Amino acid sequence: MTTQPWRSSWVMANGIRTHYSEAGDDGPAVILLHGGGPGSSGAAGWRFMIPALAPHFRVYAPDQVSFGQTDMSDPHAWPYNGIESLVEHVAAFADALCLDTFHVVGNSQGAYVAAKYTLDHPTRVKKLFLIGSATIAGAMGVAPMMTPGMKALIEYDGTEKKMRAFLEAIVTDQSTVTEELVKGRNDAYNLPGVPEATKVFSDVRPKLVSDPNLNQHYSLEGRLNKLTIPTKFIWGAVDKFAPPELAHQFQDKIPNLPIEFIEGAGHQVQTDKPDIVNKMVIDFLK
């Protein structure tokens, strides 16, 4: 596309040629962290939010490790430390852009990365906005659930047909799953090194709970409840990937962070209800 309301840029972060989408020229900086579905990227995950935030903020939406156009052709860039590699990459990304302080918004796996980065670097983050995350639920000790969305994720095989099935499982507004989006995300997944990097990440994921050394870095229990940085947490009321039941199971562990459920929204709340969520984010961050 040649008329996108954002700019496509590159930076070296932690030795990784990192792609990101940016918009806006004035105001506080905001980093948007996308989810962990195949072919995801800053632009794909936040395509309705980036232009809405641009008049008020400087917006940066990086393609995280093993996603989007961020270069995975070198095996040294692969996420051998699992999700901690993503947190480290975000830290390097912020440093590479010389962002001293900024807001962070994250969805799904990106919400976990946002929360973990904030807990690890509390002096850097001004405000934090989280959107539905099974990864956060897992880090709070909640057992995973086999949902229609999770089933679609497991069944994804690198084809556009299965990509469409996955994307339709994470939203309620099926009109947002366009041919362009399906093809773009599927092409991104099939870039050199991405399937291999994704496998490395998937192999580490089960160990985040079973391996005590990895779990101590992954777990948010006893940490998220002590977060003092202004934070807002929302969740899709009809999420078929990470159902509200997951949130209910750990809500009592984070009394400081009440979770607000958005009616009619699935896993990508920002895609299903862009007007509502964009206003919430702008009002909260301003």
Image (tube, helix red, strand yellow):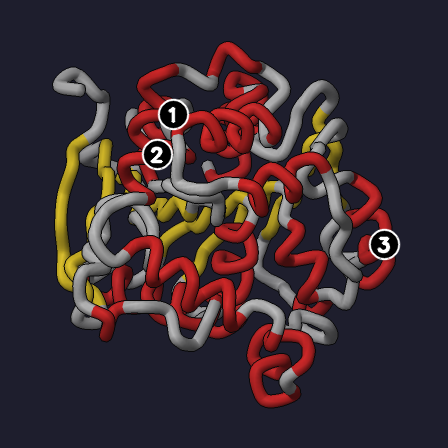
What type is the residue that disc 1 sits on? Val
In x, y percent, where is residue 50? Answer: 34, 30
Judge by depth and name the residue closer to the eye, 261 or 180.
180
At a point 76% along the width and 39% down the height, the residue shown is 243
Q: Are marks 2 and 3 in contact (CB under 8 Å)?
A: no
* Residue type (three-letter) at the residue carrying disc 3: Gln
SS of the residue under disc 3: helix
Question: Between disc 3 and disc 1, whose residue precedes?
Answer: 1
How far apart are labels 2 and 3 at the CA level?
Answer: 32 Å
- Residue at 62% from the left image edge and 57% from the top image edge: 135
Q: Report how far apart the C-alphas of labels 2 and 1 lie in the structure.
A: 5 Å
Tell me, yes or no, whether the two marked residues, 3 and 1, touch with CB atoms within 8 Å: no
Residue hosting label 3: 249
Left or right, 107 with respect to 38, comes to right
Up the image or down, 63 lies above or below 202; here it is: above
Q: Nearer the viewer, residue 175 or 157?
A: 157
Asked if the residue under mark 1 is in contact with the one under mark 2, i.e. CB atoms within 8 Å, the reply is yes
**Residue at which label 1 appears:** 182
In the displayed structure, 59 sits above or below 109; it is above
For residue 185, which numbered disc appears in the image? 2
| Residue 171, quarter of the rendered image | top right
Foreground mark, 2 or 3, reads: 2
